[in-house]
Amino acid sequence: MKSRPIYVEIPIQTDIDRLWKASQDPEQHEQWDLRFSSITYLPKKEQEPQLFSYQTKIGFGLEIEGWGKSVGSFHAEDGSRTSSLHFGTEQKISLIREGKGYWKYRPETEGRVTFLTQYDYSPRFGRIGRGIDHFLFRPLLGWGTALSFDVLKRWLEKGETPASQYLRFFSHWILALLFSFIWIYHGLIPKLLYKHPLEISMVEGSIPFSTDAAPGLVMVAGVCEIMFGLLWLGYRKRRRLFGLQMFFFPLLALSAVIADAGYLRHPFTPLTFNLALFTASVIGYILSEDVPTARHCKRKK
C-alpha cells in the first residue's frame, strides 16, 4: 500500500523573522511541537549541515531518540523561505526508520505568513509496519503536526504559551472522555442490562401516572444516556454540552431527592454525585473556550 506524504498548512498573522525563529530555534521549537520532547543542536562544522538530536517520550518510561540534519535553507527573491530536513532513528522500537521533509514560509498580504510542511518517511517492520503506519500511525502523526501548528499560530498571534494551550487541550479532552464514559456506563449497565430496582423506584417516585410504565421509561432513559455519551466523542462544539450539563445535573439531583429524600442518607447520594459532575462541567465549560484544534490546518495541497 502506498501512503501519502504528510502535508500541513496554516496562515499565521506574524512577521516571517519571528516565525522563522520560533520554528528554527530548538528551545522555541520544542515548546510547541507535540512530536518532540526535546531538540538539541550539535556542534556545527564549517560547510556542513547543522546536526541535531531529538527525544520523544512515548509513555511508560519509554523514549525514542533520533538524529536529524538541516540539509539546507533557501531564501527566495519573493521573500519566501524553505528549510529542508533529513531525520531518522536507529532505535528498533520506533516505527519510523528514516525520512525527509521541508518547511516553507510564504509571506502573504497584510502581515500574514503561510507556514507549511511536507514530509515522508520509511516505516520499519515490513508489511505489518506499513499497515500500522498507513491506518493508524501516519494519520495520528499528521493530526499531531496540525495541532502543533495551530498551537504555534495562537502563540505568535495571541501570546498564549504552548504549555498553557496544551494544558487546556488535554484537560478538555480528559473531561470529555470522562463524561462520555459516565453517560454510556450509567445508560448501559444499571438501566439496560440489569434494570436495577433503584433506577425503577426513582422513576416511580417521579412520575405522576401509573408505575407500570417505569421499567420502559428506565430503558428509554438508558438509550438516551448512551446516545448523549456518544455525542461527547463526535460533537465538535463540546462547550455547549458542558453548558447543558451545568443546567441538567442540578435538576437530576433535585428530582432524585424529590422522588425519595432517603437517598440523602446513602453512601453515594445523588446530591454529592451530581454536585461533583456539575463542578466538573463548570471547569470544562471554562477550559473549552478557544481550544487548539487540528481542524484549522489545511491537510492537502
Image (spheres, rainbow, N blue to C red):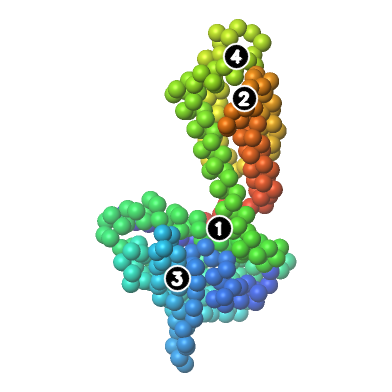
Residue for badge 3: 55
10 Å crowding of disc 3: few (<14), some (14-19), many (20+): some
Who is closer to the viewer here, 236 or 168?
168
- Whole-angstrom CA distance, mark 4 to mark 3, is 59 Å
Which numbered disc, 1 or 2, marks the residue that appears first in the sequence?
1
Q: Is residue 220 left or right of residue 131?
A: right
Q: Which mark, by number, is residue 155?
A: none
Residue for badge 1: 147
- Whole-angstrom CA distance, mark 1 to mark 2, is 45 Å
Residue 2, percent from left and from top: 34, 56
- Whole-angstrom CA distance, mark 4 to mark 1, is 48 Å
Residue for badge 4: 204
Q: Is residue 214 left or right of residue 93?
A: right
**Element type where label 4 sits in the image:** helix
Q: Please, which residue is most extreme toward the right here?
A: 110
- Whole-angstrom CA distance, mark 4 to mark 2, is 14 Å
Observer-side mark, 4 or 1, equals 4
Residue occupying the point 57% across, 17% down: 201
Asked if the residue under mark 3 is in contact with the one under mark 1, i.e. CB atoms within 8 Å, the reply is no
The amino acid type, in three-letter code, at marker 2 is Tyr
Residue 5, percent from left and from top: 43, 61
Asked if the residue under mark 2 is in contact with the one under mark 4, i.e. CB atoms within 8 Å, the reply is no
Which numbered disc, 4 or 3, marks the residue that appears first in the sequence?
3
Residue for badge 2: 263
